[in-house]
Amino acid sequence: MKTLTLMIATFGYVGFAPVAPGTVGSFAALALYAAVRWSASPLFEAVTIAVVFAVGVWSATQTEKILGISDPGPVVIDEVLGMLITLAALPLGWGGIAAGFVLFRIFDVIKPYPAGRLEAAPGGWGIMLDDAMAGIYAHLAVRLLIWWRPEWMLV
């Protein structure tokens, strides 16, 4: 069970990247995003986000116990969730996906209110909730960019 927990929390061990594991995890999340988007089902996209959140809370909580530290760096399932929320239900081209990636990373690092406070929730809840909030901020920012410069963002 420990192996499964670590595999999920680190998104297939991507979280053990020696440099910038959060950024590497966010980039790796684009593979899951592509698979989900390929399904062309908004319901499947929403269910995937809900499942990643639920499994992420569980695996992040367990990984904290396994590694004996709070909010361990190798846990990147939260970045996967944040990227899925950022790009959810938007008809994006490469420019929009790149903008979403950059905006999510910015919001994830600076943690504007209430993301920083959500991070204080116990265990995997805090790990997942602050990135969910960063994903919501980034999603809204991408929507603004679509409105402002649709030719840069859309398919």
Image (cartoon, rainbow, N blue to C red):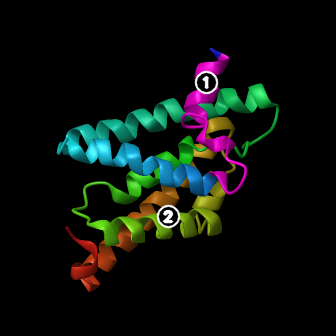
What amino acid type should be assigned to the residue bearing mark 2?
Answer: Phe
Label 2 SS: helix
Q: Which quadrant, please, contains the C terminus? A: bottom left
List x then y, in percent, for residue 54.
47, 32
- Mark 1, residue position: 5
Q: Mark on residue 80? A: none
Q: Is residue 26 magenta?
A: no
Q: Which quadrant, please, contains the N terminus? A: top right
Which residue is painted at 30% across and 71% down in the image?
A: 143
Q: Is residue 94 above or below residue 31?
A: below
What amino acid type should be assigned to the residue bearing mark 1?
Answer: Thr
Which residue is painted at 34% across and 37% down in the image?
A: 48
List x then y, in percent, for residue 129.
55, 48
Instruction: Please identify the residue farthest to the front as the structure is shown.
Output: 18
- Mark 2, residue position: 104
Q: Is residue 155 above or below residue 37?
A: below
| Quadrant in the picture for residue 2 | top right
Label 2 Cα neighbours within 10 Å, binned few <14 / some 14-19 / many ≥20: many
Label 1 SS: helix
Q: Is residue 36 above or below residue 91?
A: above
| Quadrant in the picture for residue 3 | top right
List x then y, in percent, for residue 154.
22, 71
On screen, residue 155 versus residue 138, left or right, reads left
Q: What segment is highlighted magenta in the picture?
A: 2-21
